[in-house]
Image (cartoon, rainbow, N blue to C red):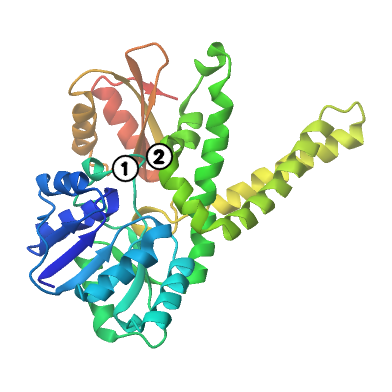
Amino acid sequence: MRTALVIGTGLIGTSVALALRSRGVEVHLRDHDPAQARTAASLGAGVTDEPAGPVDLAVVAVPPAHVAASLADAMRQGAARAYLDVASVKGGPRRELAAVAEKEGLDLSRYLGTHPMAGKERSGPLAATADLFEGRPWVLTPPPAGDTAVLNLALELVALCSAVPVVMDPDAHDRAVALVSHTPQLVSSLVAARLADADETAVRLCGQGIRDVTRIAASDPRMWIDILSANPGPVADVLADLATDLDETVQALRALQSSDDAERTSGGDGVADVLRRGNAGRERVPGKHGAAPAAYETVAVHIGDQPGELARIFADAGRAGVNIEDVRIEHATGQQAGFIQLFVEPSAAPDLTASLRDRGWSIRR
């Protein structure tokens, strides 16, 4: 791949362009908002000049509702040798494009739908980075009789962005992202919405748990309306199952208030069941490097909110010869301090704890 055209210079499109430019690909940028394309160009993502002829690959990075129209326009212009989109919904846009292609005689063999499983709470070109896709799954949905050359270009794009290719059926993809991406967004927003009118004294008690659950609730509503409007059925199906679980859990909690011993026991069993099922589901979430999740030990260390503290504790962990597998910072409310949770292999936890204590760190038991 020597040349590419990126249509849509938001977070994903600009990040794709930045990754391609870093690998020496000549990138042209196009957006319905010329100012946004110029912003992306100013970041080094490419140039806003139209290419002199067909590029090797056109990447359509627009909301799902506009994917089919944008692809059809590019195909009519003969903009590229191959075309792909990076929308988070695959089945609907492909069917829309197929209807246009049949009517106008467009060559669908040069198109392949894809979806990089990466993003941020922030949107727009200013949030873009060349390493956004590094190590992330990138779904490819090639048709059974697709063009091998187009698939090879898509695989090259994935490699240039340092992502990991995953081949799926378009509708299977849409059901999967409904479960692992779209429904979590709505659930996060629903929990965060409870805080909007909550008493200030309650909000001041927010800890790491509520921060974890509501992190993605900060996402742009306009972007998510576009996404959810393109995949409403599968998301509604997951939410319906979740609603059943919620109703049963509410009934179990009500039962715990009963004066009847048998009813309280039944309520406790119901709550325990959902918690156990949650444990089982959480254990299936891939861990480090996509492997099965590991059971790490947590070493919690009191840390001051001042420059150099993080660097110092990581350096001290390195001196102890311990690899930090993961990390989380828990901020103390109203104080210039908090706790950093260092996740390590269980066998390494005692040595790390002792070494950090020797170097003056306060360890929380």
Taking 190 as reference, is 160 above or below it?
below
Q: Is residue 44 above or below residue 136?
A: above
Amino acid type at mark 2: Asp
Can residue 245 be seen from the camera position used here? yes
Q: Which residue is mark 2?
A: 220
Q: Quadrant of residue 21?
A: bottom left
354 shown above or below 127: above
Q: Secondary structure at mark 2?
A: loop
Task: Tell whether label 2 touches label 1 (CB within 8 Å).
Answer: yes
Of residues 87 and 306, the one drawn nearer to the viewer in this rendering = 87
The x, y position of residue 155, in whole percent, is 26, 73
**Total numbered labels placed on residues in the image:** 2
Cα–Cα gap, marks 1 and 2: 7 Å
Left or right? Give the position of 62 relative to 243.
left
* Residue at horizontal 38 percent and vertical 78 percent from the top: 142
- In the rendered image, residue 57, in percent from the top left (x then y), is placed at 20, 71
Q: Earlier in the sequence, mark 1 or mark 2?
A: 1
**Visible in this render: residue 161?**
no
Residue drawn at 55 percent across, 11 percent down: 201
Position of 274 with respect to 64 (left or right) is right
Secondary structure, mark 1, is loop
List the residue tagged with mark 1: 123
Looking at the rendered image, the quarter that the C terminus falls into is top left
Task: State left or right for residue 3 relative to residue 224.
Answer: left
Query: Amino acid type of disc 1?
Result: Ser
